[in-house]
Each structure stands twice: as structure tokens, then as C-alpha cells.
Amino acid sequence: MTPTPAPILITGASQRVGLHCALRLLDEGQPVIFSYRSERPGVQTLRERGAIALFADFSSEAGILTFIDELKAHTTRLRAIIHNASAWEAETPGEESRAFTDMFSVHMLAPYLINLHCADLLQRSRPADIVHISDDVTRKGSRQHIAYCATKAGLDSLTLSFAAQLAPDIKVNGISPAMVMFNEGDDAAYRAKVLAKSALGIEPGPEVIYQSVRYLLDNPYVTGTTLTVNGGRHIK
Ligand SMILES: NC(=O)C1=CN([C@@H]2O[C@H](COP(=O)(O)OP(=O)(O)OC[C@H]3O[C@@H](n4cnc5c(N)ncnc54)[C@H](OP(=O)(O)O)[C@@H]3O)[C@@H](O)[C@H]2O)C=CC1
Ligand SMILES: Nc1nc2c(c(=O)[nH]1)N=C([C@H](O)[C@@H](O)CO)CN2
């Protein structure tokens, strides 16, 4: 009798990349626990596929700690944690501090506290992984998304520190995408501008992130690494 595999936690999986990755993991028979903040169609889709849905608002320490308690009430072990939840906010006059604080909390405080409080769940799995989903923009900064970029750069730092602290039992890596899927409101001019920034010039879709996650989960000799998935922006 093959033992049931320990679940993989993916945060912010109600839509887009997180939803795609959760569905691909389920397709492979991998149990999934996911966090959501807004009740979107993807939440019900994942529930119907057998995934465990846990509400989470990572905009405060209290919200993060409440989520951790809820997670531990649902499982005693984890195969991996994929930190995908993210807010992409530009600087908005009068809203700068609120936006910075919100993005610090979701991009840095949540992964930090979840990793610290849930490493024991990962220790009960072999192999075990943490994946931080960051952004290629940390390579050079961003004029329009200063706080977003800074908090994602902080996430890149967490990758290095947790990889050192948790080795050899738990591998810790990052994925740094550039645009992989547009948002509904993106107009043709914006899309053309963004596509022109990369050497490959395509909107690849979320599968390229799942492929990167799969590589990191399956490779026993990669930790402290951040995979660049940017269509060759850095050589353009
Ligand atoms: N899409 C792209 O082209 C790119 C994506 N990335 C990164 O890849 C990852 C996935 O991207 P994408 O799918 O577009 O992400 P989304 O913008 O769709 O965000 C994913 C989820 O994060 C959740 N979230 C946001 N803030 C909070 C919070 N405070 N507490 C809890 N959950 C929260 C949202 O929940 P809800 O809306 O339900 O409230 C949302 O569904 C992200 O980390 C992103 O930064 C990097 C570069 C390019
Ligand atoms: N949480 C999110 N982060 C990012 C998104 C997004 O939709 N949600 N989108 C981008 C853009 O595609 C950007 O890469 C375009 O240059 C970046 N981060």
C-alpha cells in the first residue's frame, strides 16, 4: 500500500499562476492545501478537485499567524510550501505607506513567519522544499513599482537565508518570472510594450512557472538558487 504523499501548500491559488500550479499538482495525484483571500471561481474548482481551501489575509501579522494555526489544524506534515501570494501595486499618491506595508507583509513577513513556524511540518517529509515566487524586476529595480520591487528583493534574500538555515533537510529556492500572463485590463499598447522588453517576445502563460516548480521539487541538488524565467529580458 503506497502511503498518501504529504500535501503541498500553495498560497494565493484562487486564480492565475497559483490556480494553474495547484491544478497541475492535483493532476499528478499530489494532495494540495491552498490559501485564498477572495472567494473566486478557482476556489470552488480546487475544492471540487479535493484540495483543502484555507482563507488567508497576509496583510497583517495576526492574519498570518491565524493562517498558520489553521494550516496546522489540517495537516501534521508538508511536502513543500510554494509562496505565490502577491500584490502588484504601483506607487499611489497618499497611499505609499499602506501599499509598502501591505506588500512587505505579503511578500516578506508571510513567507518569513510561515517558514519559521512550519519548518517542522516540512521536516516530516523527504524530500522537502520551499519555493519563493519573486520577480525578475529585482535584478534592476523598477521606477513604477518601487515598493513592490523592494519587497520582492527582500523575498530573494529570504531564499538565501532559509536555504542556509534549513539545509540539508529542506531545499529552499526561488523563481523570478518576468511577465508570464497579462491582466484582463492590459490594453494592446501596454501588451506590445511589455512583449518588446524580452528577447523571446511572448506571453508564455502559467505553465512555465509550473515547469520551474517541477524542476525545483524534483532536483535533489539545487538549493539557494533563484530561477530566472524572463524570456531573455536581461540580454535584450
Ligand atoms: N503574472 C505575471 O506576469 C508575473 C507574476 N509574478 C509573480 O508570480 C506570482 C503569481 O502571479 P499572479 O498569478 O499574476 O498573481 P496574482 O496577482 O493573481 O496574485 C495571486 C494571489 O495573491 C493573493 N493575495 C494578494 N495579496 C494578498 C494578501 N495580502 N493576503 C493573501 N493573499 C493575497 C490574491 O488573492 P485575492 O485576489 O484572491 O484576494 C491573488 O489571488 C506572484 O508572486 C507574482 O508576483 C512575477 C512576475 C510576473
Ligand atoms: N502579484 C502580481 N505580480 C505581478 C503581476 C501580477 O499580475 N500580479 N504582473 C506583473 C507584470 O506582468 C509585469 O511583469 C509586466 O512587466 C509583475 N508582477
Image: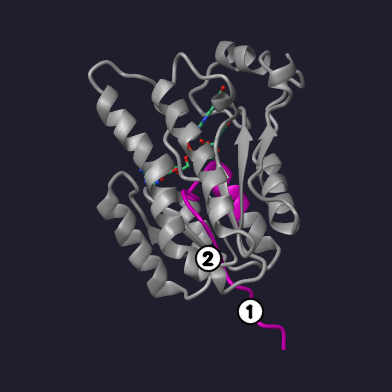
Element marked by disc 1: loop
Q: Residue at horizontal 31%, vertical 44%?
A: 59
> What residue type is disc 2 on?
Ala
Looking at the rendering, which quadrant does residue 23 occupy? bottom right
Q: Nearer the viewer, residue 184 or 90?
A: 90
Element marked by disc 2: loop
Left or right of 1: which side holds 183?
left
Looking at the image, can residue 50 be seen? no
User: Is residue 20 highlighted in magenta?
Assistant: yes
Which quadrant is the C terminus positioned in? Answer: top right
Residue 157 sits above or below residue 178 on the image: below
The residues bearing labels 1 and 2 have C-alpha atoms spaced at a distance of 14 Å
* The label number, if any, that marks residue 51 in the structure image: 2
Q: Position of residue 124 (x, y in %)?
A: 56, 74
Structural crowding at the residue carrying mark 2, measured as other residues with C-alpha within 10 Å and reported as few (<14), some (14–19) or many (≥20) = many
Can you tell which of label 1 and label 2 is closer to the viewer? 1
Residue 228 sits above or below residue 192 on the image: below
Residue 134 sits above or below residue 173 on the image: above
Q: Nearer the viewer, residue 32 or 59?
A: 59
Q: Position of residue 139 (x, y in %)?
A: 59, 24
User: Is residue 230 highlighted in magenta?
Assistant: no
Q: Residue at horizontal 42%, vertical 56%?
A: 114
Q: Nearer the viewer, residue 44 or 74?
A: 74
> Which span is picked out in magenta?
1-22
- In the picture of the structure, the residue carrying the numbered disc 1 is 4
